[in-house]
Amino acid sequence: MAPCRVSVTCHAHAQFNNLTTLCFFFHSGFFITSWEISATNIIQTRFNWSIQYSALLVGGIALTPAISAPLIGKLSYRIHDKHILLGCASTQLVSAVTLFDFGSPVLFLIGSVFYFQAVTLQLIFSFATSSKVCYQHEIEPMQTWINTIAL
């Protein structure tokens, strides 16, 4: 009886982890979209830039994970996955403080680079590690749901 109960408990724990992963992907899209709208608004109102120049700056900040994502991938050979994800979550938490209105748009933009990096890298790295935390028969459905939510 005990082995059966343990496997049921482990299966329930795995289902909880899968649900948590899907919820994270669902919410991270909202965080990124909210940041893009807020950054565009602040750049236009505080710096009096046109929509084209503010879109270029926001797009430039959004492009920075293209540089750091391969570096994090190489770092994952030396550091455990959970430490990288915790580092991204900690960076996201600390840099979110700079997103409040302290009267300095420069502080907001500098914090935005770190915030966007942390959210995007956590999203990318969580997707890459989803095959490690799911059972073999759950990998394909999990990645299908993640792709559907990410759209």
Image (spheres, helix red, strand yellow):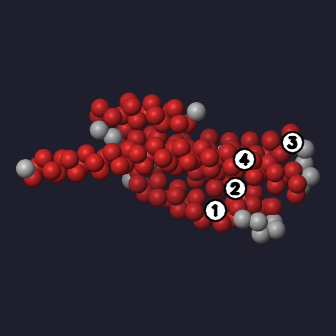
The tally of labels here is: 4
Instruction: Residue 59: name its quadrant.
Output: top right
Q: Which residue is mark 4?
A: 36
Please identify the residue farthest to the left as the structure is shown. Answer: 1
**Residue, x 64% and y 56% (percent of image)?**
114
Q: Are there few (<14), some (14-19), or many (20+) residues within 10 Å of tag 2? A: many
Of the two numbered discs 4 and 3 on the same chain, state the one appearing first in sequence. Answer: 4
Percent from the top left, x then y, of residue 146?
Answer: 48, 36
**Labelled pair 1, 2 in contact (Cβ < 8 Å):** yes
Tag 3: residue type? Answer: Ile
Q: Which residue is mark 3?
A: 51
User: Which of the two labelled residues, at mark 3 and mark 1, occupies the earlier sequence position?
Assistant: 3
* Residue 78 x, y percent position in the rendering: 40, 51
Q: Amino acid at mark 2?
A: Ser
Amino acid type of disc 4? Glu
Dot 1: element: helix
Which one is earlier in the sequence, the residue at label 1 or at label 2?
Answer: 1
Do the residues under discs 3 and 1 have CB atoms within 8 angstroms?
no
Residue 112: image tag = 2
Closer to us: 17 or 115:
17
Q: Residues within 10 Å of mark 4 (few under 14, many from 20)?
A: some
Q: Can residue 72 be seen at all in this image of the molecule?
A: no
Q: Which mark is in front, 2 or 4? A: 4
**Callout 2: SS:** helix
Q: Callout 1, which amino acid?
A: Ser
User: Who's the residue at 43% across and 57% down the image?
Assistant: 83
Q: Nearer the viewer, mark 2 or mark 3?
A: 3
Of the two numbered discs 1 and 4 in the rendering, the one whose residue sits closer to the viewer:
4
Task: Please state the horizontal and vertical placement of residue 92, each as a whole percent of the image.
Answer: 58, 58
Residue carrying label 1 = 95
